[in-house]
Amino acid sequence: MSSRAFVASLVAFSLTGCAGMVVTTTKTGLDGKTVVTSSDPAEQARIDAEARENEDYAKAIAAAPRRAPQDVIEVAVFETYVSEELSQAVDRKKLEAMLLGELSNDARLRIVPVKGLSSSGLRASASTEERIDAARAKGISPDVWVLPAVLLTDAVGTSGGKLVSMKAFTVRGEVISAYGTGASQAEDKGTLFQNEQVVKTTAARTRSVVLDQLGPNLPSREAVAGLQKARMQKKVATIEEQAGILPEDDAQTRLRKILEAAKNGPKPAQAAAQE
């Protein structure tokens, strides 16, 4: 069981000038929910407001019109992770090209390869959330994320008519709705000599997950675009209010006030310790 299955606690200590020490705690429970608390009332108010805004957005996505069956689904596919024990036995680029080609065989899917991520998204220990955040930072905004991996997993086979434990060549794809409306997994196993067929089968199962499981519950892109525009306008209005911007202010005055507000805000120097 991975460490993410246990309660993780991240405590960050921030010095905010003469205001003293501010302690911000982030806890993720077994249910996957994250709770952030701060000893600073102003920061806690900001955290609570952001949590409410995220919750309202999730509710709006859930209530938005669903997309039509003929609408194309954009699928962002990350670079394939290959386990260390298979790194010398598998041609990752060839396997990856095969997987992308198989996924592209359905006209209802628009495949977008995810490449050139920042170091935080490329490191082996990066979480799914970190990799997706790194992709979004590059402007990638699909309907569905696919994170493929090639590894060896435990399996049961037969030898001389007897059941024996063995290691199977496995291709697995984590398939995640970009709107938080669902997630699933596609997988196939075989021997190393069956790697091409395993890739093809996993790709077919991935297409089925996207189209048949996640597809019907995806919100329409038009509805999402409207919700995101309204969300951005609300954030801009909040920034302008905090900066004291007036309707009669010209562009130069608005920019100056925003920069002053950012300059006068807290600039914590953070050191984090994870339990």
Image (cartoon, rainbow, N blue to C red):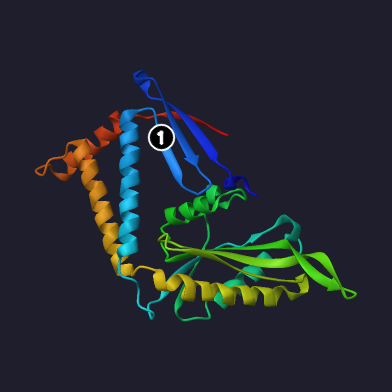
Taking 112 as reference, is 231 left or right?
A: left
| Residue drawn at x 48%, y 72% as measured from the top left | 213
In this rendering, is residue 35 above or below 32? above
Taking 87 as reference, is 131 left or right?
A: left
| Residue 144 in the image, given as x and y percentages of width and height | 46, 66
Residue 256, visible in the rendered structure: no
In the image shown, does 116 or 52 lie closer to the viewer? 52
Q: Residue furthest top?
A: 18
| Residue drawn at x 42%, y 66% as measured from the top left | 143
Taking 99 as reference, is 108 left or right?
A: left
Residue 28, visible in the rendered structure: yes
In the image shown, does 225 or 38 lie closer to the viewer? 38
| Residue 267 in the image, given as x and y percentages of width and height | 37, 30
> Could you classify mark 1 by the number of other residues whose Cα lies within 10 Å: few (under 14), some (14-19), or many (20 or more)?
some
| Residue 105 in the image, given as x and y percentages of width and height | 53, 81
| Residue 96 in the image, given as x and y percentages of width and height | 62, 68
Determine the secondary structure under disc 1.
Answer: strand
| Residue drawn at x 32%, y 29% as measured from the top left | 41
Q: Amino acid at mark 1?
A: Thr
In this rendering, is residue 96 above or below 124? below
Q: Which residue is mark 1?
A: 37
Quarter containing the C terminus: top right
| Residue drawn at x 71%, y 73% as measured from the top left | 195
In the image shown, does 144 or 48 lie closer to the viewer? 48
In this rendering, is residue 110 above or below 232? below
Q: Residue furthest right?
A: 160
